[in-house]
């Protein structure tokens, strides 16, 4: 499908640029369920896999190297992924104890630098309802909550993100990601202007076999996926605009974005339940 579209393309600069980005994205995401939509002025690759899951990072980076990486990495596409990366990096250094752990002032400095990175990269601020991240500090056996208010909109500001709570609240992250399962969400996209049952608008995510130990999470777009379900789907919902996060105990966010080490099967210790 992709190459049949490419055969019909002209060879102007924008087409070549689009082709390069298309092949690059296809390589990064691997085999994914995708659709090509075409008209006289627009070509779009649609991948239904949730993009923020199972990335890897170097835990041995210094704090300055971490900031440099956050500033340039193509894997990081929004500020929540960056915050999760800082959390994982700090937690790993605390737990291994063979690396220099961070003081609270260093963690606060990282968040300040992350604010600059967010503005430089043009990321949208987080919703004001996003809880603070729990990060580890060397002088305590408990996680220390780091204030990320500078990365969030105020209650008076309009936010480009919407937090959608899952109807299914009994799942533990690895239990869900290790087997067959679905998650259901009620959400009416603002682009849906005509619907006879707006109270039942929503979407379903399901796990499908992937290339690693854990399963890939995919947005359901086929009508059969919504037969006899409590929600119906509108095509305005796009997987590439989603970021899954899991909250447990005291508003602690589980950094699912950086489960690459679990997904690949290289290390299954320290499972998050």
Image: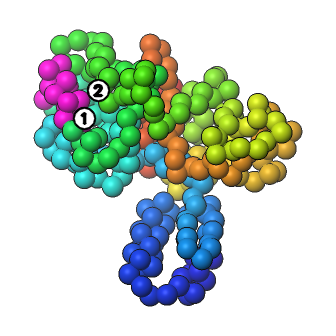
Q: Position of residue 190 (x, y in %)?
A: 63, 40
Give the labeled residue for mark 2: 150
Q: Is residue 136 above or below residue 159?
A: above
Q: Are marks 2 and 1 in contact (CB under 8 Å)?
A: yes
115 relative to 157 in the view: left or right: left
- Which image quadrant is residue 262 in? top left
Q: Main secondary structure of the magenta part?
A: helix
Residue 83 lies in quadrant:
top left
Identify the magenta region. Answer: 100-115
Q: In x, y percent, where is residue 154?
A: 38, 23
What residue lies at 80% left-to-right and 51% top-to-bottom? 223
Q: Residues within 10 Å of mark 1 (few under 14, many from 20)?
A: some
**Sooner in the amino-acid sequence: mark 2 or mark 1:** 1
Q: Residue at x 14, y 20 (%)?
A: 105
Q: Tell me, for residue 262, which label it has, or none.
A: none
Name the residue carrying label 1: 115
């Amino acid at each position: 499908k992709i190459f049949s579209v490419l055969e019909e393309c002209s060879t102007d600069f924008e087409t070549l640029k689009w082709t390069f980005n298309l092949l690059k994205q296809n390589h990064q995401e691997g085999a994914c369920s995708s659709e090509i939509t075409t008209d006289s002025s627009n070509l779009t690759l649609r991948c239904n896999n949730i993009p923020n899951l199972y990335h890897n990072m170097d835990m041995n980076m210094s704090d300055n190297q971490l900031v440099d990486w956050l500033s340039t990495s193509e894997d990081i596409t929004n500020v929540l992924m960056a915050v999760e990366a800082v959390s994982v990096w700090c937690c790993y250094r605390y737990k291994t104890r063979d690396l220099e752990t961070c003081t609270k002032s260093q963690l606060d400095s990282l968040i300040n630098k992350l604010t600059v990175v967010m503005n430089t990269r043009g990321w949208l601020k987080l919703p004001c309802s996003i809880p603070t991240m729990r990060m580890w500090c060397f002088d305590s056996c408990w996680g220390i909550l780091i204030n990320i208010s500078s990365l969030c909109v105020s209650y008076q500001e309009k936010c480009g993100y919407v937090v959608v709570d899952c109807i299914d609240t009994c799942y533990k992250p690895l239990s869900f990601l290790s087997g067959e399962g679905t998650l259901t969400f009620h959400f009416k996209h603002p682009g849906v202007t005509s619907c006879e049952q707006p109270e039942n608008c929503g979407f379903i995510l399901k796990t499908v076999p992937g290339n690693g130990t854990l399963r890939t999470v995919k947005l359901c777009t086929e009508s059969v996926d919504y037969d006899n379900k409590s929600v119906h789907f509108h095509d305005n919902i796009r997987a590439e605009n989603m970021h899954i996060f899991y909250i447990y105990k005291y508003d602690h966010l589980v950094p699912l974005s950086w489960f690459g080490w679990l997904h690949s099967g290289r290390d299954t210790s320290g499972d998050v339940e």
